[in-house]
């Protein structure tokens, strides 16, 4: 059964699924949808046009669905959409989108989001990511599946972070971070690939070795970016895991960290 603490304020228009729990002093707005088996801690505000899936754990003092921190925003009914089985720890803030983009901030499934994380307007976060405490991503950032952001990572607006990439604590990203690549630093530098993470996710030794060779081609061969991309593309037929890297390099708009 759905459990709403007597001190919580839940708008009559909010739609709550089965076995939802709302903690003390939390506020649930008029246009909020919360799926089955999701728990909301105390002193949390969920507002705006926000849709939350099932089996999520939202801890205390979060602010979800607030209006974007964008001076162009003029009250349009933009959205925040959160998938299933996410853990969202204390003091996180996620904002709705803007009409200058898709009008939607979207967070996928099975993400582990630690305390004080901020996800700004129009961001797209994939599945199985880990955002360590105080990771902050600005507007329009795209974070693909299995990314790990170290504590206090800051990401500039419009940056794209590829699947399986990883940042060390305190990293500041101003350019796109390709799939598989690790980066660290306030003036960030690439530091190899996330080979241990790839092994844990079932990548074969041959696949990991192919990704390592692609990294060396991209960062240590002295080739131009276009030459490196062409060389990696030539190897992608035998190693399909390189295709996402080739596509990422072709589509990067801010330029990659290099």
Image (cartoon, rainbow, N blue to C red):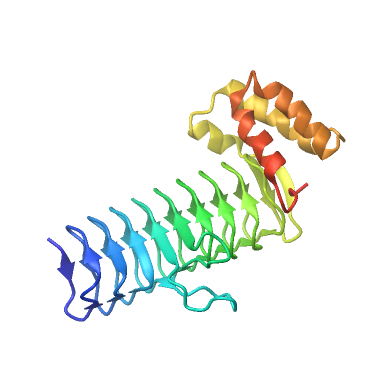
Q: Could one spot residue 41 in this view of the protein? A: yes
Residue 99: x %, y % from top left: 53, 66
Q: Residue at x 47, y 61 (%)?
A: 104
Which quadrant would residue 34 be assigned to in this image? Answer: bottom left
Q: Residue at x 63, y 41 (%)?
A: 179
Q: Nearer the viewer, residue 204 or 121?
A: 121
Q: Residue at x 24, y 77 (%)?
A: 11
Residue at the left extreme of this rendering = 1
Q: Could one spot residue 220 in this view of the protein? A: no
Q: Quadrant of the N terminus?
A: bottom left
Which quadrant would residue 3 be assigned to in this image? Answer: bottom left
Above or below for 198 versus 177: above
Residue 244: x %, y % from top left: 61, 35
Residue 132: x %, y % from top left: 51, 58
Q: Nearer the viewer, residue 60 or 46?
A: 46
Residue 168: x %, y % from top left: 63, 53
The mark tally for this picture is 0
Above or below for 215 versus 160: above
């Amino acid at each position: 059964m759905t459990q709403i603490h007597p001190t919580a304020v839940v708008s009559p228009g909010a739609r709550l699924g089965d076995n939802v729990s709302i903690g003390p002093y939390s506020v649930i707005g008029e246009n909020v949808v919360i799926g089955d088996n999701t728990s909301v801690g105390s002193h949390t505000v969920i507002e705006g046009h926000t849709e939350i899936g099932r089996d999520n754990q939202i801890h205390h003092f979060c602010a979800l669905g607030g209006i974007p921190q964008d001076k162009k925003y003029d009250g349009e009914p933009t959205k925040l959409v959160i998938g299933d089985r996410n853990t969202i720890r204390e003091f996180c803030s996620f904002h709705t989108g803007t009409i200058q983009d898709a009008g939607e901030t979207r967070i996928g499934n099975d993400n582990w989001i630690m305390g004080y994380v901020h996800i700004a307007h129009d961001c797209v976060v994939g599945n199985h990511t880990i955002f360590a405490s105080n990771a902050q991503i600005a507007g329009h950032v795209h974070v693909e599946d299995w990314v790990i952001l170290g504590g206090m990572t800051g990401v500039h607006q419009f940056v794209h972070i590829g699947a399986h990439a990883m940042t060390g604590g305190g990293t500041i990203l101003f350019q796109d971070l390709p799939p598989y690549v690790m980066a660290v630093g306030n003036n960030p530098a690439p530091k190899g690939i996330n080979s241990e993470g790839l092994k844990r996710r079932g990548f074969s030794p041959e696949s990991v070795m192919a990704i390592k060779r692609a990294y060396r081609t991209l960062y240590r061969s002295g080739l131009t970016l276009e030459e490196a991309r062409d060389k990696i593309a030539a190897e992608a037929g035998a190693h399909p895991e390189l295709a996402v890297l080739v596509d990422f390099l072709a589509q990067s708009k801010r330029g990659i960290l290099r």
